[in-house]
Amino acid sequence: MSEQVIAALDEFVQKYLATAKKHPAMLLIEYDSDWPSECYTSSGNTGDKVDWQPIKRSDLANFSDLEKALEMKIHEDVISYYSAYWSDNLIAETDKGHLQLLQPLNQNDFERLQQNLVGHILMKRRLKQPETLFIALTDEDDFILTIDNTSGEVMLEQVGLLPKEVVAPNLAAFIQSLKPAYINS
């Protein structure tokens, strides 16, 4: 487990919650009774906007089935990142624009996330490209932020293409560079 990644994410979540005090809409989510989550701090009818907040996980996410299916070891930064919280995606700002840090809202969402990671890795293998694992969506169509599974570097990648650039030497440094963002939509 990467303590640096968890500490960086803990600090970012605290900044996110502080920013949300000025912009309470950051912590509103559509309630879905078929998609229960510890993150909901109130309930409502499906489709209602309700309050939520990131909830620290007490257990390490299990990636063993994913690792077995792909016959590879998942980078410890990715395991730590997806094990830290149950949360809706967290909006952040960089000097290049906005992004969404992907987070699992509940166990079903985590399982869906793993299925999407399998699809991503299989696509990378089919294209004979280095294996990367996504961690964030950017505000540019088809561009994602990924972790190079070998080096741990954070990469800007257009889906289906080789990574375009190294954004940070590691995930902890990347998270530390982010500012929570409120996008009025």
Image (cartoon, grey):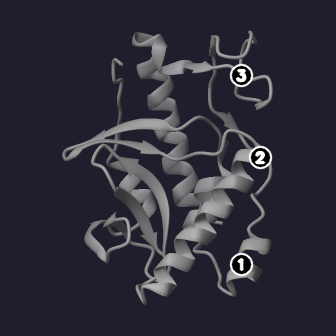
Mark toward the start of the polypeptide (1 vs 3)? 3
Mark toward the start of the polypeptide (3 vs 2)? 3
The residue mark sitting in front, 1 or 2, is 2
Task: Estimate how packed mark 1 is, as few (under 14), some (14 to 19) or many (20 or more) residues with alpha carbons within 10 Å.
Answer: few
Residue 5 left/right relative to 109? left
Tell me which residue sits at (54%, 19%) in the image. 27
Percent position of residue 99, x then y: 36, 43
Tell me which residue sits at (58%, 45%) in the image. 103
Residue 169 left/right relative to 81? left
- Mark 2 = which residue? 108
Task: Estimate how packed mark 3 is, as few (under 14), some (14 to 19) or many (20 or more) residues with alpha carbons within 10 Å.
Answer: many
- Mark 3 = which residue? 40
* Residue that extends furthest to the left in the rendered view of this protein: 95
The amino acid marked with disc number 1 is Glu
- What label sits on residue 67 in the rendered view? 1
Percent position of residue 3, x then y: 59, 59
Q: CA distance from mark 3 to mark 2?
A: 15 Å
Percent position of residue 94, x then y: 26, 44
